Image (cartoon, rainbow, N blue to C red):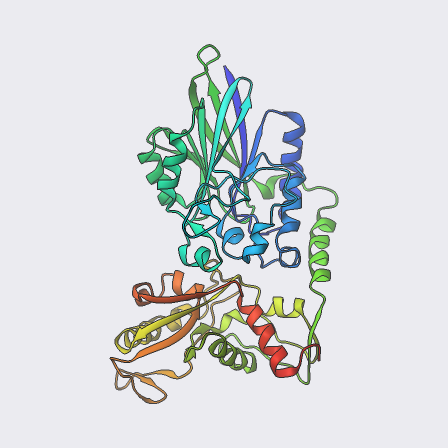
Amino acid sequence: MKRLTIWHTNDIHSHLEKWPRIFAFLHEKRLAAQDDLFFDIGDFIDRVHPFTEGSMGQGNVDLLNGLPYDAVTIGNNEGAALGHEELAHLYDRAEFPVVCCNVYEDQAQTELAHFAKGHLYIERDGIKIAIIGATACFTEYYESLGWGIEEPIQAIKREVSQIEADVTILLSHLGLPLDEKIAAEIPEIDLILGGHTHHLLEHGKEVGGALLAAAGRWGEYVGKVTLDFDEVTGKLVSKQARVHTVADLPAPADEELQVATFLEKGKAELDQKVVALPHQLAHNWFKSSEISELFHEAACEWTGAETFLTNAGIYMTDLPKGTVTAYDIHQLLPHPLNFIVLSMTGVELDVLIHEIAEKEAELRDIPLRGFGFRGEVFGTILTKRMTYDAELDMVLWDGAVIDPEKIYRVVTHDTFVYAPFFPIIKRVAGKEVYTPELLRDVMTWKLKEKYGEGG
């Protein structure tokens, strides 16, 4: 019996406090068995960490080089949270290939993105292994950034039709529901290493003839898959998956120093003066604040919207009197969030404000994680200009009854669009995504405008 061992990580999201143990564990495996394969399934980077922000992800690529991995695919935090040039050059120093069959250089989808291959082959002990990669289809983001993106199942089927191999592996940053659909529809795929929806499959999951494996989120687990092949025929005869809990792995002697160094390197990269403030700007998670008022103004100016709908929990810190650096602004707004403008009829706006009134108290204190939000608690929902009169059960705009026929331009951000809190937002047809600038980039622009660049 021939055995192929595969190690995989996914959705680490720059949780670099976990990286020293993960790297030490995988490096030991790499040295012990040169034929083992190592894959990352995307969202290895997350601009919430100063190390990633300061290097625009290239520091993370250097970490992957340390092993190095045998191949990676991209997640939305690589593909949709970086500017076009930053993604185009993210892997310039990579010592591993990137596989992703559904991101293109252009919206017409005439040429695959230069940083990626649609598929590749690796051979181990006479076994020919095909590797395909695919990423989640955030069309508005990729197209606004100047890329093209294809529906993934169609793209995967095309790659599969071109492959001749003993075993086919998909690196899928698509999420568990799509992985299950792919396994059912594309029987040529033997193994799907998954991510995106942060699902943990401790012992894998069989769907059709495929084994699905995934290692959760944030570097909490490392996945291991073993594939056994008949010695004579070379046919794949068995597949097994398991995970290792990172907290249970041995800690390197310099673990704390490594983690501190990641942070210090990031802080050093972001230690550029942006403005000098004449007084502190305060934040508050449970009501409007100086910072929220300033940013409301910035959001409306930047997008041409009439109001900014947000949760107060996005504002993480005060801004100090005196010198404010890029690091300070990153800590204030660490989230990889973009503005999204909703063009809503008065009828839709009425539904939205009713939904907010129903959910606001429930959401206020929840420790939300995901949907682009990287804060502690959701906080109060700030609905400047929009109010709800509970006695009259009436939605008001600037104190007057809303016009059901009018189109209102309301700017919000990814969390409100993608989290399942307010169903009406999903149904709004008119959405404009503002890229590549994240919220903190617009805050930087506003501070410079109001207080003078460089002080």
Position of residue 322 measured from the top left corner of the image (x, y, whole percent)? 71, 80
Tell me if residue 408 comes above or below residue 109 in the rendering. below
Task: Give left or right: position of 416 versus 428.
Answer: right
Residue at image coords 74%, 43%: 253
Position of residue 10 measured from the top left corner of the image (x, y, whole percent)? 52, 44
Q: Quadrant of residue 449?
A: bottom right
Residue at image coords 64%, 50%: 58
Which quadrant, please, contains the C terminus? bottom right
Is residue 17 something one can see in this rendering?
A: no
Q: Quadrant of residue 35?
A: top right
Question: Camera-side residue: 434 or 74?
Answer: 434
Task: Give left or right: position of 235 versus 83.
Answer: left
Question: Camera-side residue: 25 or 408?
Answer: 408
Tell me if residue 99 comes above or below residue 405 in the rendering. above
Position of residue 188 measured from the top left corner of the image (x, y, whole percent)? 37, 28
Question: Camera-side residue: 81 or 358?
Answer: 81
Tell me if residue 3 comes above or below residue 107 in the rendering. above
